[in-house]
Amino acid sequence: MVGVAGRSKGCNTCRKRRVKCDEAKPQCYRCIKAGFECLGYQRATQWRHTSLAPVTASRLHVPEFVDIVQPVPVSFVPPPELSLDAFERDMCTAHMFGNFVWRSYGTLWLNHACEGKLGNLSLDAATALSQLSFGLNNRVQELQLKGAAQYGRCLRILAEELRRDKATAYDNRRLVVPILVLMMVSAIQTDRTGAVFHLNAIEKVLMLCGPRAFQQQPLRNAFEAARATLLIASLFSRRRIFLEDPCWQDIPYALDPYAKPQQSRLLDVLVAIPGLLEENARIDSMGYCPEDESPVPSLVSDKRLICRENLCESIIVLLEKVFRWRWHWQREYGQYVSAEEYRRQLNTPPATDFESIDTPKELRRLRFDRSVHANDIMLYNSALMWLMTLLWKLKPLQTRSIIQGCARHAATSSALSPQSPALSHISFDPLSQPGSAFSIRDPALEICRVFDWQCRHHDQCGALDDQACLYLFPLGMARSVLDAEPHYQKWIDDMLDLSPITAGYGRHGGSIVGFSSYITRCALYPDV
């Protein structure tokens, strides 16, 4: 009898799984990547009978032969494809895409990242997000730890990539997706330091790559998500953003201009607003000077007046652009919006959670053909509120006539466009016509009416590859405008509480990107 080793040099786990082992020491990488415990390479000694002499029947009852033929207990181990580890990735990924805000924000590019089509870093970042979100929501500590460890590894790899030479900058366009995903991870971890790092990283990558790097999908959608994210940060800081340059608005769609979605055109307007806020802050600071450098008051007043006029002209240009967009949208998509009277018998309990929403009786409920159309109108009203609020702050006595003039010019230019129907044939009902509202309460209420439909159709988000980068942002602005009206606040809370994903959004006070600090009484009640 001699002791001989097994012929395979692979680890014990790979031998059991009947797969080829990479034979890495002390643990093979194949087991680690597949989520299995590597059992190492040490073999149990196997004894084989090597004698060529025949064994007599009498010797079969000798103890050494009896031990050999005794039944050996075998424990059943399910095949790898039936283990929990094999389902873990799919389970966590499905949970992640159940978040309709993430799903609509990451349309196309988040799917590609989870499928490994955008490189290993994107896949690893998506894995970290899915594991962490599932672990936190279901209180599975093991998945939380796995996701946190994966997040840390991704951060180290990302830092190394960002330190690389600028000669490879064009290839760095693929870093946009992992940065966006890691930013989502920092959000659910409430990691402010990480969020700031990711914001700086994504700004650096965009500037290094240039707009031409994002002309193909899914990176073009990733660019739109990055643009929206940087917009929110710039509104907070009130600093001009480089994305207001027209090249960032046109070049990504140069190969297919007709593919540019309506929300992207509204983002073209919104990215200019941080620059307006920065200029407004500069004008406000002109009244203050150090004691040793006090200028002549009249010169300061004249300069301030000129700057204020220039700022108002910039706002007027954007307001007319927004109104033109609204005319075009109504011509193309107005047929997909309708309204229904809200009726429910008194003393009758609601049949569903949707019916429990305390919708104001004076407002008709809207209906949309697609979720993307609802998102368009909400984002339009957000841009409109920003511009109207700034006008009421800068020129309260002239704002009403300015709004009317912009609406008139927009209607005229829309009528002159080729193949456009007569203005009298275009009806905006049940929505508001451009220029019909002078109070910012009107666009705020229209946002709430739209979200009243949206909150009952969250399942449509991200369908048909429709992207919504600022899903809750408009409702947050509307809440700021209607802050002093409890029945509208309750309406907003009821709509948000329908889903655990949106429940509590903006309820604990504060202002969305500081918007409420610009709201004046004239903007709310221009007729008073």
Image (cartoon, rainbow, N blue to C red):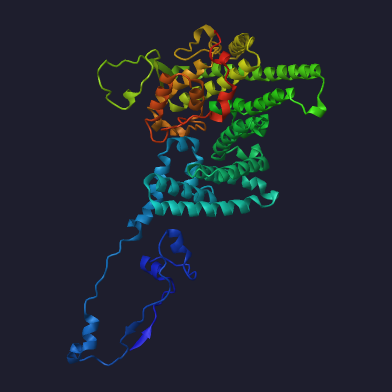
Identified at 68% across, 24% down, the residue is 280
Identified at 49% across, 27% down, the residue is 476
Does 363 appear above or below 198?
above
Identified at 64% across, 9% down, the residue is 397
Residue 309, position as x, y percentages in the image:
71, 16
User: How many numbered dots are placed on residues in this image?
Assistant: 0
Residue 15, position as x, y percentages in the image:
38, 69
Residue 159, position as x, y percentages in the image:
61, 52
Visible residue check, residue 261: no
Instruction: Give 224 or 7, whichever is nearer the viewer.
Output: 224
Residue 364, position as x, y percentages in the image:
39, 15
Q: Is residue 388 left or right of residue 82?
A: right
Does 363 appear above or below 20?
above
Visible residue check, residue 233: yes
Does 526 appear above or below 194?
above
| Quadrant in which residue 417 is drawn | top right
Q: Is residue 248 left or right of residue 423?
A: right
- Residue situated furthest front in the rendering: 291
Q: Quadrant of the C terminus?
A: top right
| Quadrant in which residue 221 is drawn | top right
Q: Quadrant of the N terminus?
A: bottom left
